[in-house]
Structure formats: structure tokens, C-alpha cells
Image: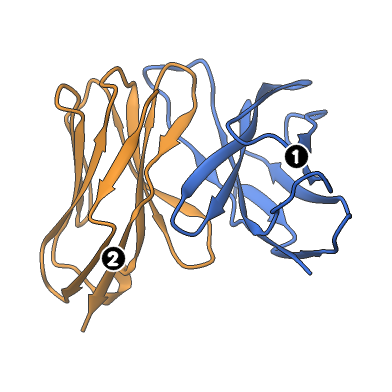
Chain colours: A orange, B blue
């Protein structure tokens, strides 16, 4: 059974730092991996989707990488801002169009 | 603009009542999903449907029921059999049958259900 782990569970950094959020999964037979952002009391907003044939995706200050063989993905946030404060979740998809979610990393960026 | 609409945003249920949460999408997605989110536990799949008039149980289906009479709509009923229904409920949708070029989930804004 696929299990998804995100470390650390919480992270607090000063504004301007570059940071890395980690996601690991136990079954490397995935088709895709999706990173989401969730603000308190809100739904999930998709940030980046990486297909299994890709190694990374970029959107603005965000870069997500995927290493299927080692069961790992990282989300890199450059020059962090207080507005980046949220919970970040990763989810992996197999061949069933369903995603399995990690428990998230709660990020706080302070001025 | 296309998207998913969940209503209501907040819902209060008395003991022994059934309540229904609405989820509507205009993205022309075939698949729809219901997740429950509790603090510290991540998202757990309740039910999902990949085609009209068909749906499957997820990991925590007990005490819940769904219907999929229209492609656009996937309502979730929380029955009195669900012993601990207080949670944040999230609906999502996606395309199907397009692997490996699938474009992921789109989520609604959620419904917070509280038992009073």
C-alpha cells in the first residue's frame, strides 16, 4: 500500500530564505505527483504537477523535482515571503486516477 | 470561470440527523472525489466516482453515502451512523483515462461540518 510522508511537519523561517520541503513515497510505481497549498480553513490549490516522465516542474519561485527510483520529491521555494505561509501537501497518483496524500508541512515565514 | 463549488461553507448537525453536502463542477471532469480532513491526519478518501451512476468506497466510507446522477454533481450525505462527523470535507474532480498526461485534481473550497 502506498504511503506518503512529508518532513518536516512544521517549519518556521525568516523572510527571504530559500527553503526545501520534502516528500517521500514507498511505491515508486507512480504516474504523477502533485503539490498543493492549503491556507487555513480553505480548500487545496494546485501548485505543480509532475508526470512520471518528468524530473521537475517550475512555476515562478517554486520548483518541484521528482526522483521516482528513490521515492522522493522536493518542493523548492526561492526567496520566501510571509504570503507563502500555508500548509503544503504532496500527493502521488498511480494508475487509478486517485491521489494518495501526505500529511503536509506547515510553513510559517516571518518578516 | 470553470471550477468546483461546495456548499454550504459551514454546516451544523444535531445528533441523529442526516446532512447532505453539495459539490458541483463545471470543468467537464468525469471523476469526482470526497475527502475528509482532520487535524494532523491529512486527507482520507471517503467515496469516489469515475462515471455517472457509478461510485466506489474509499478508505473511510462507513456512515457516508453518495450519488452520481449527473456528471456535474456528487453530493455526500453524512448519516447518523457516522459517529464522529465533525471535520472539514473536501470535494475534488479530475479527468480520467488520460494517463500519462493526466492534469491532476481540482479542489473545492470545502465544507466544515460540526456536530452540536
Residue at label 2? A107
Quick one: B38 or A69, which is closer to the camera? B38
Quick one: A41 or A56, which is closer to the camera? A41
Say if residue A92 shows up in the picture.
yes
Q: Quick one: label 1, few (<14), some, or many (20+) residues within 10 Å?
A: many
The quadrant in which residue A87 appears is bottom left
Instruction: Judge whether B65 appears above or below A1 on screen.
Output: below
Numbered disc 2: secondary structure: strand
Q: Chain of mark 2?
A: A
Query: With B105 as the anchor, is B74 left or right in this view?
Result: right
On the rendered image, what quadrant is the C terminus of chain B found in? Answer: bottom right
> Residue A36 location in percent, x, y?
38, 49
Say if residue B2 shows up in the picture.
no
Q: Quick one: label 2, few (<14), some, or many (20+) residues within 10 Å?
A: some
Question: Of the numbered discs in the image, which one, if any, rests on residue B64?
Answer: 1
Q: Chain of mark 1?
A: B
The quadrant in which residue B72 appears is top right
Q: Are marks 2 and 1 on the same chain?
A: no
Quick one: B56 or B54, which is closer to the camera? B56
Q: Are marks 2 and 1 in contact (CB under 8 Å)?
A: no
For the point 25% across and 21% down, which residue is it? Answer: A28
Q: Residue furthest front?
A: B83
Question: Of the numbered discs in the image, which one, if any, rests on residue B21?
Answer: none
Query: With A83 as the anchor, is B75 left or right in this view?
Result: right
Query: With B33 as the anchor, is B100 left or right in this view?
Result: left
Q: Kindly report the distance in space between the C-alpha atoms of the residues bearing marks 2 and 1.
A: 33 Å
For the point 54% across and 21% down, which residue is it? Answer: B96
Numbered disc 1: secondary structure: strand
Amino acid at each position: 500500500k502506498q504511503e506518503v510522508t512529508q518532513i518536516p511537519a512544521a517549519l518556521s523561517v525568516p523572510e527571504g530564505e530559500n527553503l526545501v520541503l520534502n516528500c517521500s513515497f514507498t511505491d515508486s510505481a507512480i504516474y504523477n505527483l502533485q503539490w498543493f497549498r492549503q491556507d487555513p480553513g480553505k480548500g487545496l490549490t494546485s501548485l505543480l504537477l509532475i508526470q512520471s516522465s518528468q524530473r521537475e516542474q517550475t512555476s515562478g519561485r517554486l520548483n518541484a523535482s521528482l526522483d521516482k527510483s528513490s521515492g522522493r520529491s522536493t518542493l523548492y521555494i526561492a526567496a520566501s515571503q510571509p504570503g507563502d505561509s500555508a500548509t503544503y501537501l504532496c500527493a502521488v497518483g498511480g494508475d487509478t486516477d486517485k491521489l494518495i496524500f501526505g500529511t503536509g508541512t506547515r510553513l510559517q515565514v516571518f518578516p | 470561470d470553470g471550477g468546483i463549488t461546495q456548499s454550504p461553507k459551514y454546516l451544523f448537525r444535531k445528533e441523529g440527523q442526516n446532512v447532505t453536502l453539495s459539490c458541483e463542477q463545471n470543468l467537464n471532469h468525469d471523476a469526482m472525489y470526497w475527502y475528509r480532513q482532520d487535524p494532523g491526519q491529512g486527507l482520507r478518501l471517503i467515496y469516489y466516482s469515475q462515471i455517472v451512476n457509478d461510485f466506489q468506497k474509499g478508505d473511510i466510507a462507513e456512515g457516508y453515502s453518495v450519488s452520481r446522477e449527473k456528471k456535474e454533481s456528487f453530493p455526500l450525505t453524512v448519516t447518523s451512523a457516522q459517529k464522529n462527523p465533525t471535520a472539514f470535507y473536501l470535494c475534488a474532480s479530475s479527468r480520467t483515462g488520460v494517463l500519462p498526461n493526466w492534469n491532476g485534481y481540482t479542489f473545492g473550497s470545502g465544507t466544515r461540518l460540526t456536530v452540536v
